[in-house]
Amino acid sequence: MEHPILFMTILFEKLGFGEFAHKYPQVVNSWLVMAILILIAIWVRPKISPLSPSGAQNVLEAIIKGIEDFFINITGEKGRPYVPLYLTVFIYIFLCNIAGLAPGLFSPTANTNTNLAIAIITVIGAELVGIKTHGVKYIKHFTGPILPLAPLFIPIEIIGHLARMLSLTFRLFGNILAEDLVIAILMFLAGAFLAPLPLYALFLFADAVQAFIFFMLSTMYLAGAIEEAH
């Protein structure tokens, strides 16, 4: 798929990496999102005050606490150490989603490679947490209710876990790509920048929902890995 003029591609062309940027726009735009997250963290960190929090800090803390409580309600207390990872995934996906709303940027999540990489981290990560939590007994999650049925259940469970990654990947990819295509068509038919503006509020909401769905499903996979097999 050919992409319109992208700011990050132009920047990398000036740095002598134009071919890479043209071939992998999702990668260079992902780097931009990462840089934004790092800069925000550096800027916000000195402003955090546990004794006299500002109004903005109170609001953000309330939002984060709400998401954390939602996470813990699903995974239980054993999932608390993994809140930072999954919350970071949520924020990262949301920023990647809305990147495509800005003229000259590309949504990294409109590419299956980006989504698959995140899906591998969350799905395989959940399995590693399950092994860490239960040790060798974690194999019971794959062998089914009774041991004689293990040869039947193990391949089914493996396929099911691989399907989780594909489901997360293509659900996010399809929705974000469709959004980017709608914006591109509106700009082409009715003029750049101004035509899609009435839909931007809807797109922002949809981007947040898609990030939350990815976060919620990943959380449920983690919860399944943490709980005892029956």
Image (cartoon, rainbow, N blue to C red):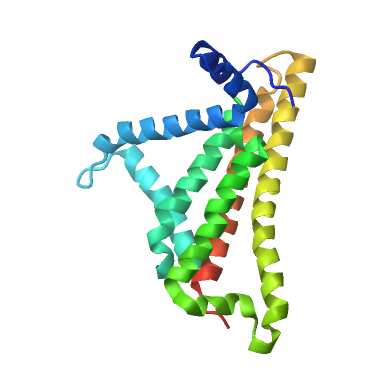
Q: Residue at x 49, y 69 (%)?
A: 130
Examine the rendered structure and indicate whether residue 120 appears above or below residue 9.
below
Q: Quadrant of residue 44?
A: top left
Q: How many marks?
A: 0
In this view of the protein, can residue 186 be seen by the observer?
Answer: yes
Q: Give how far across and how far down residue 5 sits, in percent.
A: 64, 15
Residue 28 versus residue 94 in the image, above or below: above
Q: At which x and y percent is residue 204?
A: 60, 35
Q: Give the quarter of the figure containing the N terminus.
A: top right
Residue that lies at the very extreme toward the right in this rendered image: 189
**Would residue 101 be found to the left or right of residue 39 on screen?**
right
Quadrant location, the C terminus: bottom right
Does 188 sit left or right of 168 as displayed?
Answer: right
Along the line of sight, the residue nearer the viewer: 65 or 170 = 170
Q: Is residue 52 left or right of residue 70?
A: left
Query: Residue at the location (41% across, 69% down)?
Result: 78
Does the image show residue 146? Answer: no
Q: Is residue 19 left or right of residue 163?
A: left
Q: Position of residue 109 (x, y in %)?
A: 62, 38
Residue at left 73%, top 78%?
152
Query: Measured along the vertical axis of the image, is residue 82 above or below residue 195?
Result: below
Name the residue at the top extreme. Answer: 14
Given residues 200 and 30, the one toward you in this image is: 30
* Quarter of image, res 35: top left
Write down the quadrant of residue 158 in the picture: bottom right
Q: Residue at x 63, y 40 (%)?
A: 113
> Relative to 97, is 28 above or below?
above
